[in-house]
Image (cartoon, rainbow, N blue to C red):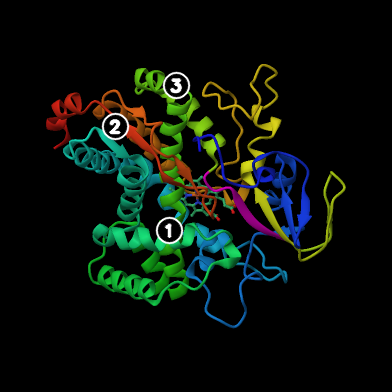
Amino acid sequence: MKPSDFPRDIRFRTAGDAFIENGVAHLRNYADIKRVMLDEEAKEFTQDTSYWAPQNQRIHISWYFLWATGKRKADGSVGRHDLLRSIIEPYFRTKPVKEMALQIENDSKVLIRKIIEKGTGHFDLANEYAYLLSLRTICSMVGLPYEREKWMRAQLEIFTQTPDLEQVKREPQEVEDYFREVIHYRQKKPGNEAIDILIEAWQNEKITEIELMGYMWGLFQAGTDTTGTNIINALSLFGEFGLLDEARANIHNEEWLRRAGEEVLRFGTPFAAGPSLAIKDVTLDSGLHIPAMTMVRLWFSAANRDEYINGGNPNATSPEIFDIHRWPNQHMTFGLGMHYCVGSQLAKLETKIALQTLLHYLPNLQFDQTKPFDRFAGIVDGVKEAHFTFDQQKAEKLLDQLL
Ligand code: HEM
């Protein structure tokens, strides 16, 4: 498998008309998805997914996270989204981008040091770097200790490799127990992280305990495998298309990093599809009729292959092609409208720092085509392994800078 291959039904990585299959409407072009995502008053669609959940039983805490809620529920009653988002959004607008850069750089250096100290000149970018960096970043931001890093990764993998949101089972009791332990500890020793804002909202009865745990899980899930995958996509796609030398030459060129970064986000689309529900009969522009109460899947990965992403630029290359100089690049990797990803700036910052530090401290970093590259298609279209080599001797000379 090559980094540009995605092990998913090709219809969901190709732009086109919507279709209904097994009772689910699959939307695959920019205009259709925009219609749903900008329907903020929930006149035709709602993103509140409580109707999917098995009734009268305790469901996975991720269902209580803001991206599974809407302005309105399917029955028209007020949903939880706007309140949940208003509690956390201000924190993202200021804290992470301004203050997280140093933390991310330090975490990146620690991981790179470990890779050089192995002495082999080889590493698996997915398991020895990218998913660990993204997990540590979220832990620092949310206020979760890293001490149970391996256990947390294992819990996440169970979740993200589940093929569909509807198949997600209730989380193991140990997750709930651990989150309660962390909440209890933070109540006694408050800090300045997202968790402190959330605990305060819970104490003031703005949110319930299960919503608090939904946030803890949701932030950890929303920001870890998505961003880790994006870092792997960047270096692996550069490797596949012979762009690593160009990347090395441009690690301080903000404009180059920005354009290449947007193209990686578009082409890879780590979070391939979002959920929605038609709350009344809807006819799309293509003529497809979607009956009321049909579950809808919004395929960002397909819409990102729609000509629309080129913003009308007649000289742009086809969206099927990976082109780091593409501009404009109107992808929908972070969604649109009121659910637009709150962590988008953090994800971009993390990817930029990962590229800068890896390409600097691992001289002659190369994609290792002799070893397998393996993706999976789950809730996140993630990567199981991605191997790279570097010049071990030259890297050891830089170890002093990694203290
Ligand atoms: C490359 C990395 C990322 C990708 C591709 C991504 C993608 C997305 C997408 C597509 C949505 C909209 C989902 C929908 O409408 O169904 C979303 C929402 C969200 N993302 Fe991200 N995300 C990334 C990183 C992050 C990070 C680092 C965080 C922060 C911890 C984060 C937190 C959130 C939250 C809280 C929402 C829900 C917003 C709402 O419903 O109002 N994401 N993300």
- Tell me if I can see residue 42 in this picture: no
Task: Give the left or right position of residue 1, taking residue 110 as reference.
Answer: right
Residue appearing at x 67%, y 58% in the figure: 276
Mark 3 or mark 2: which comes first in sequence?
3
| Residue 403 seen | yes
Which residue is found at the position 53% from the left and 34% from the top? 4
Label 2, secondary structure: give it.
helix
Residue at disc 3, secondary structure: loop
Q: Earlier in the sequence, mark 1 or mark 3?
A: 1
In the picture, the disc for residue 235 is none
Q: What span is colored magenta in the figure?
A: 270-277
Where's the C terminus, which quadrant? top left
The verdict on label 3 being within 8 Å of ligand 1 is no
Q: Which residue is mark 3?
A: 242
Above or below: residue 283 compared with residue 237: below
User: Residue 330, how many percent across, how many down?
Assistant: 61, 33
Q: Residue at x 64, y 20 (%)?
A: 316
Identify residue type, mark 1.
Glu
Please tell me how crowded label 2 is: few (under 14), some (14-19), or many (20+) other residues with Cα within 10 Å. Answer: some
Q: Is residue 155 above or below residue 104?
A: below
Q: Earlier in the sequence, mark 2 or mark 1?
A: 1
Q: Quadrant of residue 77?
A: bottom right
Cα–Cα gap, marks 1 and 3: 31 Å
Using the image as rendered, state which of residue 331 and residue 156 is in the foreground. Answer: 156
Labels 1 and 3 touching (C-beta < 8 A): no
